[in-house]
Every structure is written in structure tokens, then in C-alpha cells.
């Protein structure tokens, strides 16, 4: 498969890009933020997403979705990134769907149609500390009665306080097991925190939460593979969103270079800025290609996907970070103001950079996967 | 089985039957690279047999038309051939500036007669070409070149000098930018072709910091060039040169720019040893190598996307400048890490154990990557102007 969008994907982009730009531009983020919105995203907008079939794009057709791939989901995520749209799309429609579809069974039948129908928001309760360390999960699931009792603390759980269900990764006797924990479960509390990018992420406490045996996603002790699928999907998705954030910041900055005058010249005439902008362009193009490669390999079910997912998260992280830093610097003083959008790009980038493993985590993963 | 699958099977069988085992070994030194030409001495029978097999099949230039010595393969078939060659580590049967640079210019600007004549010679490895572009006073500002061809009716008399002419001392013919109108900067250059054995041509190798001399200074002293030996139109050689520079960057972008596109840390872990956790036993170097590996794998994806887009006309025409910039900077970084990884061993300049100082010489050689074929700074200028459309660039 060539590494560019085919005609169907180009058509998808042509419908999604103007839709997101019109319905959820940066002003949409501002209005949620300034109204101290407690949900973290707009349910009206999510209903519009649903009309377009977007929440279920990755859901298999048998479960009421569109059965599309990561390349297609990436198109939506890039636009979400470019417009800084607050949305549960990444966690619910990408991460949760990947896990449920991989596992199949009762929970897939219960939740996938609901996600596709725009009725269910699902949160991913994976991280437990300030840094992403999915290989050191301490939350425990112990057998109790007909099911399990969950104890532990989760952090950085996007939409955790409004999710209809949370996917909780916990340690069981012989490995990792994933659980579908409904929002009304007793002993489950979500404490939402406003993050730097105005999104809401929860500290989730599981205090003797009792779930039935059928709350297990997949098989007991066999959650490792399902978690891997969830992580690969979410990381690739976050990388695609970062490409959108970086591209949005870069486009805004290049435009500014063509408008702002100092010393009687457009600042874009200065070679020092031209070279930095040109360097950034190269980094963004490479990041985009890398993310597309990861999407393609995931869609093909290739063994090489794991490496490329980490490469993509790291590369997109580096490139988008450069884009927002150069963006603020090249905007000068106005870049420091709340009124101007470029700073919002810097904030969203920071949150995405941390989500599901930062640049350093994934660079380390690349070393491990190459035997050093 | 699809047509392409059938083609792959056919290629695989052909390679199995025709690529000698010696030609599946990594290239160790310059002598392992086959350049062809009138003066070429094959290193061994296998090198000769491999070239001859490929010439007969049209595989030295697989995507050129059969009438010009190629195999007439489509882009997809060519990709498959390359993949299959890579799979068995087959060496390139023939490296040549004729294939990489003059050929594409002829295909675009040559007359039918020129194409049949010169392209077949190139495809068969009969004539080794060199390139006469830069001059001592004209580097990045190439269009300021001064080598002059005086019109004498049926021929020009060329005087001047060129620099950085790769392997000019080994080449049979030169394709050369010559000023033919002093009054017109851009439309006063002709793209000439002439025999390096012509009277008045002399070459002098330039000793580089790597200790090697792949480049020459080339002097023209009243060299007579028949007025049939040019490509395109008289005084419009700059169009050909620009096209070729673009093609050169594309070619570099298509594979060469990033150098050896494999994990550097993986290769070094053996030499360095690992700690109890299985990590390369130098944490900071490990981190730098891993960060570099991310960029290598990312650039590999970029190379694939670039070629897919370029071949189907989807790429921005100036995007090869970006590829060249990113790739050459990456390769320089690789060799810095190779030197760090090698420590004091990698300082040895001529010992047998270090294959005659292969590492330091290669490291120094890479410093030219971001100078030749357009400097990194010129690449950034082009991106700023043509892609980002920045003012006054």
C-alpha cells in the first residue's frame, strides 16, 4: 500500500476537516474553558460526531460500526489536533474500541454498539503515577464471590469523571487483566483535575470495587495482549493528534511570518527565521510520514507495528513540541498572551506529549525493541 | 496470483540463477563498487558476470525503456526488483553518474538519436561519465559560473576550470555547464557533453580531509567541442541543470541521504556489552543512539512516503530539497555516533584491524553530505521560498 491517502481517505478528510473547523474551532475550546465546563467536552458536538458515524469508525461492522482502520481514525484525530477540539474520541473511539474489539466476548457485545451509537463514553484507567509505566501496574484484582474486588489508584484518566465505563488494568494472580468497570460501581470515585490544556483528567480510586466475573475484558490473566492493543491504538492516535497540533501551530506561525513587520520588513524575510521554519517543516513532514506508517502497519496487523508505534509517538512528540516552541517564540510577545491561540497549542501539545508514554519512554522502548 | 506476485516470483528466480554469491556480500571498499567505463578493470569474475547478466536483462537501469538499454519496468515492478535485490543483499551491478544524472537529463531533454546512443552506452556500463558543475568561484552560487565556450561556427572552444568533479581522473566523458553568453546570466549557459580525452583536458585529484581523493579539479585549455554535443537548447543549459539538481536531490532522497538506515544501537550493543538489565552499558550513549534510531526509522517512513508520492506526481516539486536536508544531516549524526561508539579505536587511521581507518575516513567523508548537491543552507532557502512561500526568500 502506498503511503498516502487513497481516494476514499481523501474524501473522508474533505468532509471531516471542514466539519471540525466549523463546528469545533479553537473558539469552541475557549468557550468551554471560559464557561468552566464541568464535562470536559461538548455533548452536542459528540452528537454531531455521531451523526457522521465517527465514534464507531473503528468499531467492527458486526457491532454497528464502520469497520474502518487507523489510517481513517488518524484523519479525524489530526483535525481534532489542528482545532484543539476537546473530545472523547481518542480514549473512547480509538483506545477503548481497540481493546474491546481485540477481546471480543460479552463486554465487546455490550459496549461496542453503544460506543458506535454515541451513547457511551469510555475512559482508560491505565496509569498509576505521574509517568506512564504500564509494566508496573500495582492495582490488584482479587477473586471475591462470583467476581473480583479491585483496589488501587489510577491517574491521568481522561473523561474518568463522566465515563459510562472505565477500562481498568489490574494485576491478577497470573498476569494482567482488564476490567470493564461501570460508572455506578460502588467504591469507584473519580476526582477530576483541570489540566494545563483545560481538559479534565481524573484521579480514580478503586476502593474494594466489586465486579462480576463477566466484567473481565477477554480472559483472566490474559489482559497483556489486549492492553498492548489498547496502548498501540491510543499511542498512534495521540501521535496523529499531535501531528494536527504541530501542523496547526506551524501553519499559524508561517502565516504570522508573512504578516508581522519589524525593522521595516516582514519578519519572514529574515533568513534566521526562514531556516528555522524550513527545518520545522521537514520535521513535521517526517512526523506525518512516520505516523502514517504506524497506522498502516497497525491496519495490516504487521509484527513491525509495535516498533513503529513507539517511533511515531516519539517522533510526533519531538516535532509537535518543536512546532509549538517555535510558534510561541516567533510570535514574540503576542505569543505569550492568552488572547492569541498559539499558546493553547503549546498547552495541548504538552498534555498529548505525556499521554500514553512521553518521548523518552518511547525512545527507551525503541532501544529495547532493537536489543539494547 | 496477481501480475505483481508473478513478477516477484520471476525476479526471485532470475536473481537466484544470476546473482553470484560474491555479489551478495556487503560492499567492503571502493573496489567492490562497479563503475564501468573504458578503463574499468573488474575486481573479479563475479563482478563481471553480474554486470553482464544485468545488462542483458536491462536491470542496470530497470525502469528505462528497452530501446535505451533498460527493462521497461513500471514503478511498482522496479520497487519489487529493488526489494528482491535487497532481500538477498545483492550489490548494485553498476554505479554511475550516467545512470543517476545524465540519463534522466537525456530522457527529459535529449533527442531520440542522443537517447539511443548515449543511454545504451550508459546502460551497458561502457562509458563512465563525470559531472562538471561547480567552479572554484561558483559553489552554492552555481549560476555565476565562468567556464566559457567561444562559438567558432561548427564547434566551441572551451576554457576554464571545474572543481569537485567526482572521479574525473577515471571518467571517459563529462557533462558540463559552460557559459556561451556572457550577457545573460541564466539563459547563457549550455549543457555540453565531451570526451575527457579531448585535447586540452587535464585533471588533478583533490586530497580531502578523509585522506581520499574522490574529487578532482578539471582544467579546460582550448578544448574543442563539436556543436552537436549539447543537451536541450544552446544557452538553455540552466533548465537542464536545474532539472538534474532536482533529480539528484530526489535520488539522494530516495535512498542515499540517510545513509545506512538500520538501528545504530543494535549494532553497537555487541561491541559495548550490556548490563544486567540487557541495556547497552553506557546510559548516555544508549540514550543518544536510541533517539537517533527513532529519527532513522522515522526518516525511513518518510523516504517511503516521499517515493510513493513523487512517483505518482503527488509530492511538492521542491520536497526533494527537504529530503536531502533531513537525510544528510541524519547521516552526519550517525557517523558522529559511530565515532563516539568506537572510542579511541575509531581514531586509528591506517591500522589493519580498523580496515585502514574506515570509520574516521567515512566520518570525515559524511561532512560533505550537507555541502555537495546543494548545501543544507541552500536547501532551507529553497524550502522557505518554494514550499513555505516566505517573502523575499
Image (cartoon, grey):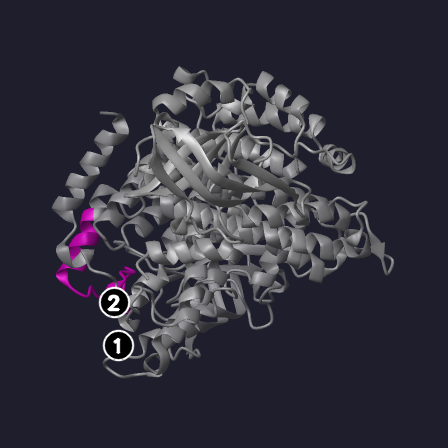
Q: CA distance from mark 2 to mark 1?
A: 9 Å
**Is residue B38 on the magenta stretch?**
yes
Q: How many marks?
A: 2
| Residue picked out by circle 2 | B28
Q: Position of residue A167 (x, y in %)?
A: 46, 34
Question: Could you say which quadrant of the image residue B196 lies in?
Answer: bottom left
Bin the neighbour count of mark 2 within 10 Å (Cα to Cα): few under 14, some 14-19, many 20 and up. Answer: few
Q: Position of residue A354 (x, y in %)?
A: 55, 50
Q: Position of residue A98 (x, y in %)?
A: 42, 31
| Residue picked out by circle 1 | B355
Q: Chain of mark 1?
A: B
Q: Chain of mark 2?
A: B
Locate the N terminus of chain B and report the quarter of the image it occupies.
top left
Q: Which badge, 2 or 1, comes first in the chain's sequence?
A: 2
Q: Is B12 displayed left or right of A317 in the figure?
A: left
**Is residue A234 on the magenta stretch?**
no
Helix, strand or loop under label 2? loop
Which residue is depicted at the point 62% across and 24% down? A46
Q: Are marks 2 and 1 in contact (CB under 8 Å)?
A: yes
Q: Which residues are magenta?
A: B28-53
Res. A102 in view: no
- Vertical position of residue B132 compared to residue A51: above or below: below
User: Between A99 and B181, which is closer to the camera in this rendering?
Assistant: A99
Res. B334 in view: yes
Q: Is B85 displayed left or right of A35 in the figure?
A: left
- Vertical position of residue B43 compared to residue B295: above or below: below
Amino acid at each position: 500500500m502506498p503511503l498516502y491517502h487513497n481516494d476514499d481517505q481523501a474524501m473522508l478528510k474533505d468532509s471531516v476537516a471542514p466539519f471540525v473547523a466549523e463546528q469545533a474551532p479553537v473558539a469552541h475550546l475557549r468557550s468551554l474553558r471560559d464557561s468552566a465546563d464541568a464535562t470536559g467536552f461538548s455533548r452536542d458536538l459528540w452528537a454531531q460526531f455521531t451523526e457522521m458515524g465517527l465514534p464507531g469508525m473503528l468499531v467492527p461492522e458486526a457491532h454497528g460500526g464502520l469497520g474502518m482502520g487507523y489510517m481513517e481514525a488518524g484523519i479525524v484525530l489530526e483535525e481534532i489536533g489542528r482545532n484543539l477540539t476537546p473530545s472523547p474520541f481518542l480514549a473512547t473511539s480509538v483506545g477503548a474500541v481497540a481493546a474491546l474489539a481485540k477481546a471480543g466476548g460479552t463486554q465487546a457485545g455490550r459496549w461496542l454498539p453503544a460506543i458506535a451509537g454515541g451513547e457511551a463514553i469510555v475512559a482508560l484507567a491505565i496509569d498509576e503515577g505521574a509517568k506512564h509505566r504500564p509494566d508496573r501496574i500495582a492495582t490488584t484484582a482479587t477473586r471475591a464471590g462470583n467476581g473480583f474486588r479491585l483496589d488501587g489508584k489510577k491517574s491521568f484518566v481522561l473523561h474518568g469523571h463522566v465515563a459510562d465505563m472505565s477500562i481498568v488494568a489490574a494485576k491478577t494472580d497470573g498476569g494482567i487483566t482488564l476490567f470493564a468497570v461501570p460508572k455506578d460501581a460502588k467504591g469507584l470515585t473519580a476526582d477530576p483535575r483541570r489540566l494545563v490544556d483545560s481538559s479534565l483528567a481524573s484521579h480514580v480510586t478503586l476502593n474494594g470495587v466489586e465486579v462480576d466475573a463477566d466484567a473481565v475484558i477477554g480472559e483472566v490473566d490474559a489482559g497483556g495482549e489486549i492492553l498492548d492493543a489498547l496502548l498501540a491504538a491510543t499511542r498512534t492516535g495521540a501521535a496523529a493528534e499531535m501531528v494536527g497540533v504541530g501542523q496547526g501551530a506551524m501553519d499559524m506561525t508561517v502565516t504570522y511570518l508573512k504578516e508581522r513587520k519589524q525593522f521595516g520588513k516582514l519578519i519572514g524575510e529574515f533568513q534566521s527565521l526562514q531556516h528555522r521554519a524550513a527545518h520545522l517543516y521537514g520535521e513535521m513532514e517526517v512526523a506525518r510520514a512516520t505516523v502514517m506508517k504506524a497506522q498502516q502497519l497497525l491496519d495490516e496487523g504487521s509484527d513491525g507495528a509495535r516498533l513503529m508505534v513507539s517511533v511515531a509517538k516519539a517522533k510526533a512528540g519531538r516535532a509537535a513540541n518543536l512546532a509549538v516552541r517555535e510558534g510561541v517564540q516567533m510570535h514574540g510577545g503576542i505569543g505569550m498572551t492568552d488572547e492569541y491561540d498559539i499558546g493553547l497549542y503549546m498547552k495541548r501539545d504538552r498534555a498529548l506529549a505525556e499521554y500514553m508514554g512521553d518521548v523518552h519512554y518511547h525512545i527507551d522502548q525503541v532501544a529495547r525493541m532493537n536489543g539494547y | 496470483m496477481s501480475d505483481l506476485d508473478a513478477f516477484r516470483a520471476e525476479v526471485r528466480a532470475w536473481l537466484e540463477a544470476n546473482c553470484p554469491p560474491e555479489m551478495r556480500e556487503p560492499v567492503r571498499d571502493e573496489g567492490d563498487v562497479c563503475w564501468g567505463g573504458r578503463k574499468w578493470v573488474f575486481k573479479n569474475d563475479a563482478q563481471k558476470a553480474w554486470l553482464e547478466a544485468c545488462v542483458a536483462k536491462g536491470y542496470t537501469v530497470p525502469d528505462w525503456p528497452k530501446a535505451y538499454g533498460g527493462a521497461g519496468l513500471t514503478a511498482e515492478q522496479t520497487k519489487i526488483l529493488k526489494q528482491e535485490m535487497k532481500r538477498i543483499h545483492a550489490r548494485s551491478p553498476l554505479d554511475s553518474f550516467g545512470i543517476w544524472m545524465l540519463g534522466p537529463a537525456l530522457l527529459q531533454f535529449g533527442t531520440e538519436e542522443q537517447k539511443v546512443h548515449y543511454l545504451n552506452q550508459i546502460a551497458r556500463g561502457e562509458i563512465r561519465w563525470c559531472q562538471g558543475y561547480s567552479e572554484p568561484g561558483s559553489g552554492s552560487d552555481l549560476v555565476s559560473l565562468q567556464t566559457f565556450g567561444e562559438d567558432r561556427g561548427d564547434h566551441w572552444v572551451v576554457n576554464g576550470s571545474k572543481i569537485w568533479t567526482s572521479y574525473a581522473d577515471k571518467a571517459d566523458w563529462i557533462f558540463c555547464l559552460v557559459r556561451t553568453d556572457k550577457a545573460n546570466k541564466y539563459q547563457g549557459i549550455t549543457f555540453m557533453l565531451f570526451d575527457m580525452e579531448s585535447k586540452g583536458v587535464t585533471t588533478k585529484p583533490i586530497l580531502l580531509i578523509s585522506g581520499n581523493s574522490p574529487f578532482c579539479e578539471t582544467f579546460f585549455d582550448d578544448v574543442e567541442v563539436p556543436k552537436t554535443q549539447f543537451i536541450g537548447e544552446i544557452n538553455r543549459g540552466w533548465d537542464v541543470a536545474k532539472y538534474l539538481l532536482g533529480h539528484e536531490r530526489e535520488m539522494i532522497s530516495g535512498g542515499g541521504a540517510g545513509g545506512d538506515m538500520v538501528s545504530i544501537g543494535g549494532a553497537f550493543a555487541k561491541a559495548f556489552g550490556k548490563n544486567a538489565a540487557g541495556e547497552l552499558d553506557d546510559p548516555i550513549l544508549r540514550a543518544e543512539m536510541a533517539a537517533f534510531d527513532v529519527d532513522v526509522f522515522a526518516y525511513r517512513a518518510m523516504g517511503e512516503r516521499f517515493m510513493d508520492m513523487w512517483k505518482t506526481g503527488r509530492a511538492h516539486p521542491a520536497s526533494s530539497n527537504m529530503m536531502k536536508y533531513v537525510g544528510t544531516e541524519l547521516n552526519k549524526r550517525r557517523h558522529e555516533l559511530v565515532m563516539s561508539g568506537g572510542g579511541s579505536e575509531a581514531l586509528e587511521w591506517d591500522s589493519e584491524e580498523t580496515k585502514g581507518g574506515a570509520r574516521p575516513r567515512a566520518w570525515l567523508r559524511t561532512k560533505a553530505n550537507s555541502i555537495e548537491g546543494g548545501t543544507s543552507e541552500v536547501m532551507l532557502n529553497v524550502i522557505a521560498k518554494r514550499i513555505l512561500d516566505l517573502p523575499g526568500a
